[in-house]
Amino acid sequence: MASEDTEAVQPLVPYLKTDASGPYLAGSKCQACGHLFVGERRVCAKCSARDQMSPVRLAERGRLYDFTVVHRSFPGVDTPFVDAIVDLEDGAHLKGTLLEVEPDPEKIAFDMPVKIVYREAVPVGGGGKPYLTYFFVPA
């Protein structure tokens, strides 16, 4: 992560947390069946167990499961970019933007190892306060 003071900016999503060691993604693990989810949950969507969810820190590495190259987006968003779904090493699944790759399907390998990086961003159009978000990059 760059040298920005990440505690001064608000996370974009509620499952992006910060502590003394820096930013991380938070999830919930079902104590009944072991399934892992991104974000806070009270009920397991896999086995329907209630009040069996424990907070966990999600893995920082994974593998590219699927992707699409986006050529049209909101006004002010640079295209093309790679929208990705990643299977994290701990079993969670996460969607985000894949950086540092050419947005060409012929040059992107399924199952490629990736890691999560955290960066400060500004809202499209330059209005509003900066925020903290996550991206994927090749590992």
Image (spheres, rainbow, N blue to C red):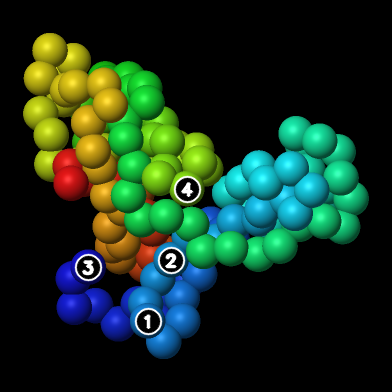
Residue shown at the point (42%, 36%) measured from the top left: 87
Tell me if residue 43 comes above or below residue 117 in the rendering.
above
Residue 28 position, x and y percent, is: 66, 55
Q: What amino acid does circle 4 point to?
A: Asp
Residue shown at the point (42%, 43%) measured from the top left: 88
Crowdedness near tag 4: few (<14), some (14–19) or many (≥20) residues, C-alpha within 10 Å: some
Residue 118 position, x and y percent, is: 31, 61
Q: Quadrant of the N terminus?
A: bottom left
The circle on residue 90 is: 4
Q: What amino acid does circle 1 point to?
A: Ser
The circle on residue 135 is: none
The circle on residue 24 is: 2
Q: Callout 1: helix, strand or loop?
A: loop
What separation in Å lies between label 1 and label 3 (alpha carbons)?
12 Å
Give the mark, 2 or 4, whose residue is nearer the N terminus: 2
Give the mark, 1 or 3, whose residue is nearer the N terminus: 3
Cβ–Cβ under 8 Å for marks 2 and 1: yes
Cβ–Cβ under 8 Å for marks 1 and 3: no
Question: Which of the two discs, 1 and 4, sits closer to the camera?
Answer: 4
In the image, is 82 to the left or to the right of 107? right
Question: Dividing the picture into quarters, in which one does residue 117 lie?
Answer: bottom left
What residue is shown with label 3? 1
Q: What amino acid does circle 3 point to?
A: Met
Nearest the eye: 119 or 41? 41
- Examine the rendering and report whether any part of residue 132 can be seen: yes
Cβ–Cβ under 8 Å for marks 3 and 4: no
The circle on residue 21 is: 1
Give the mark, 2 or 3, whose residue is nearer the N terminus: 3
Residue shown at the point (75%, 34%) measured from the top left: 46
Q: What amino acid does circle 2 point to?
A: Tyr
Crowdedness near tag 3: few (<14), some (14–19) or many (≥20) residues, C-alpha within 10 Å: few
